[in-house]
Image: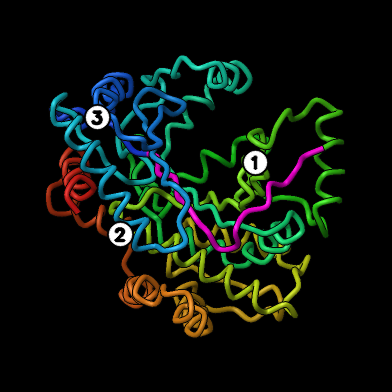
Amino acid sequence: MLEFNNSIPLTMGVELELQIVNRRDYNLTRGSDDLLRVINKTAHGYDIKPEITESMIEIATSVHSDHHAMLAELKEMRSLLVAAADKLNLGLAGGGAHPFQHWEDQRIYPADRYKLVSELYGYLAKQFTVYGQHIHIGCPSGDEAIRLAHLLARYIPHFIALSASSPYYQGVDTSFQSSRLTSINAFPLSGTMPFVPDWEAFNAFFNKMAQLKIVASMKDFYWDIRPKPEYGTVEIRVCDTPLSIDTAVALGAYAQTLASYFFAQRELQPLQTTYLTYTYNRFQACRFGLAGTLIDPAGGAQSSIQQDILRTIEMLADAADDLGTADAIEQLRVRALSGQSDAGWLRGCYEKSGSLNDVVRQQSAVWMTQ
């Protein structure tokens, strides 16, 4: 049986998967061990670790209630990472996918779990060289985590569209704003959590899956949103890693503000119909970003994702003021109003230079300095 370790409501943390590139042609390079070796020469106490392939590194914040403190911590972590990367002549970059790397060139990081993933999923493990932001929101109980996860599902297209930063993949313009999630879709345990009413029912589902030997732990589920019982959180997993730290923090604050609103509005209950429109809305966000169409599962009304975000931000105004997230929410409102995303910025870089190598150079410069 899974025990949900209750946490303080509305605490949060984020994880960011980063690209490691060389500074010659800005392709991915197997630099995670060298980078960690240099970083760990300094006593730092931060959560910095390798990921599934050697051209990735993941950083995770500590637990925060205030997004300003989380931003300050991420800036300190970035300073440590950039200093180490400079010593090794490496670059670090945000973005959901490297524009021109080839998956067959990647090497699985030699950790037991990643070896098992590679043995099970074959070439899909190397294709998993994509880069995401995960957002954790603290919940007071397993029942509240299930409720929150279902309520957040309606707003998943917002997080995809606002973070979209993977228009290029394997040297090709995919025509998507976020191509990263198509790699995750290939895994058999991707998708969405079943529509269970509470933690007891979730445990019954998990136990059955474990008895069938389909899963051994929650890590085996690659769902867009999942409860994380050992942390006492709900984890949102759909975001591309943004190009800048500021955007990553604003997205964390948006999730925190939505959760605050849902915790306060007890009359709001999850709707199973959310999952009737879920896949369509998710695709629209990946393909078209802010310009995509969103179908409201409650009444069937259609609008652009941009319009839905702006309406939601209005709905959250009081919650944002009470929580102290109004500045972060305003940053996302301006982004939505502009109709531009990191994906659009990357395409603009390519239009000017005609070089994907130069695109990566510029996105690396953004993450390492802004």
- CB under 8 Å between discs 1 and 3: no
Read off the magenta span.
1-17
Q: Amino acid at mark 1?
A: Glu
Q: Is 149 located above or below residue 365 in the figure?
A: below
Count of number-bearing discs: 3
Q: Is residue 347 above or below residue 318?
A: above
Cα–Cα span, label 1 and label 3: 36 Å
Check disc 1 and report its element: helix, strand or loop: loop
| Residue 4 x/y as whole percent | 72, 47
Colour treatment of the image:
rainbow
Q: Residue at x 52, y 25 (%)?
A: 125
x%, y% of residue 360? 22, 41
Q: Quadrant of the N terminus?
A: top right
Amino acid of disc 2: Asp
Element type at mark 2: helix
Tell me the CA gap for discs 2 and 3: 25 Å
Q: Residue at x 52, y 43 (%)?
A: 182
The residue identified by callout 3 is 27
**Disc number for residue 364:** none
Residue at 41%, 20% (x, y): give it.
104
Residue 120 picture location, percent across and down: 63, 20
Per the image, the residue denoted by label 2 is: 246
The secondary structure type at the circle numbered 3 is loop
| Kind of residue at disc 3 | Asn
Using the rendered image of the protein, determine whether residue 85 is visible from the camera's viewpoint.
yes
User: What is the number of the mark on residue 230?
Assistant: 1
Q: Is residue 321 left or right of residue 71?
A: right
**Is 88 placed left or right of 163 in the picture?**
left
- Look at discs 2 and 3 and give the one toward the viewer: 2
- Which residue is at the front of the view, 354 or 191? 191
Among the two numbered marks 1 and 2 on one chain, the one whose residue lies closer to the N terminus: 1
Does the segment drawn in magenta span residue 15? yes
